[in-house]
Amino acid sequence: MPVGATKSLHRMKYGAYHIGAHEHLSPDQIEHLVTLFNRPTRSSELTLGGRTSVTIDEIEGVGPVVIKHYRRGGLVHFFVKQTYLRRGKTRCRLEYEMLDKVRRIGVGAPRPVAYASRGKLIYRCWLVTREVPSHKTLAALSMSDLNRAVYLIEPIVRAVDRLIQNRILHVDLHPGNVLVDPDDRTYLIDFDRAGSYRSGEKALRTRYVARWKRAVIKHRLPDVLWKEMQVRLLEKHTSGPQ
Ligand SMILES: Nc1ncnc2c1ncn2[C@@H]1O[C@H](COP(=O)(O)OP(=O)(O)O)[C@@H](O)[C@H]1O
Ligand SMILES: [Mg+2]
């Protein structure tokens, strides 16, 4: 298959679950995943750790995976919990497809393994990705080893630049949504609600910087994190025609 070509999705049904994946999943693997979808979860309360609950397990033949259970915040969450009113594709499928797309344009991001949903008009859904093992978020790293965190801003900016070139807006890019592995590879996560951006490139750069800076200040992370991001993404950038 040529580089960058889209591989077709396998769509599977298992009881009430609709599952999609690029790789074929065996009945045993699917059964294991469905058990994990139903395992009670706890939300992480860490700094910028996110509100979604995640489950980590090892699937035979796939490896360690992270399962993200989608939830909704605020009052509606109270009533609707993990269920959403469906409009077109499920959020899990959209995030799965976005991960696949950004990886194809060379952005470091976890490998999507599968997405699944249950229910039609009102549904629950799950995203399964390959675990980034022994990771820290950039937010956590900036508290324990600031030099290393600052050194990693450059590759992160390169990844964001790729998104910008492709007019992709990740609506929530902050240091809690960047994972760092023990070899200093960086992965952007949490592409929920990401999409294409129609306005100009400059506006998109400004938007990325603003979101990043707001999170750094709100969570009292070191200012150098947003300053470096701003300099590299805005000021050093010699913009061509918009
Ligand atoms: N592929 C992955 N590998 C390792 N950890 C992950 C992976 N995906 C998510 N996580 C963990 O789960 C947390 C929440 O995931 P995220 O996609 O940011 O959801 P949200 O912020 O919406 O709750 C992350 O901060 C990270 O700790
Ligand atoms: Mg997050």
Image (tube, rainbow, N blue to C red):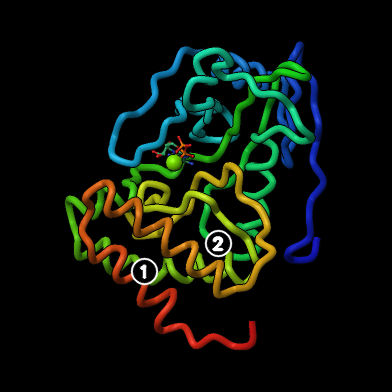
Closest to the camera, between mark 1 and mark 2, is 1
Name the image quarter holding the C terminus.
bottom right
The residue under the point 53% across, 40% down is 130
User: Dot 2 corresponds to which residue?
Assistant: 107
Q: Quadrant of ligand 1?
A: top left
Q: In which image quadrant can residue 13 be found?
A: top right
Residue 6: percent from left, percent from top? 78, 55
Quick check: 228 above or below 191? Answer: below
User: Dot 1 corresponds to which residue?
Assistant: 229
The residue under the point 53% across, 26% down is 72
Q: Amino acid at mark 2?
A: Val
Relative side of 186 to 45, left or right: right
The residue under the point 49% across, 34% down is 64
Are there few (<14), some (14-19), or many (20+) residues within 10 Å of tag 1? Answer: many
Q: In which image quadrant can residue 198 be found?
A: bottom right
Residue 83: percent from left, percent from top? 62, 19
Residue 177's disc number? none
Identify the element where label 2 is drawn: loop
Q: Measure the C-alpha gap from mark 1 to mark 2.
A: 17 Å
Comparing 95 with 194, the one in front is 194
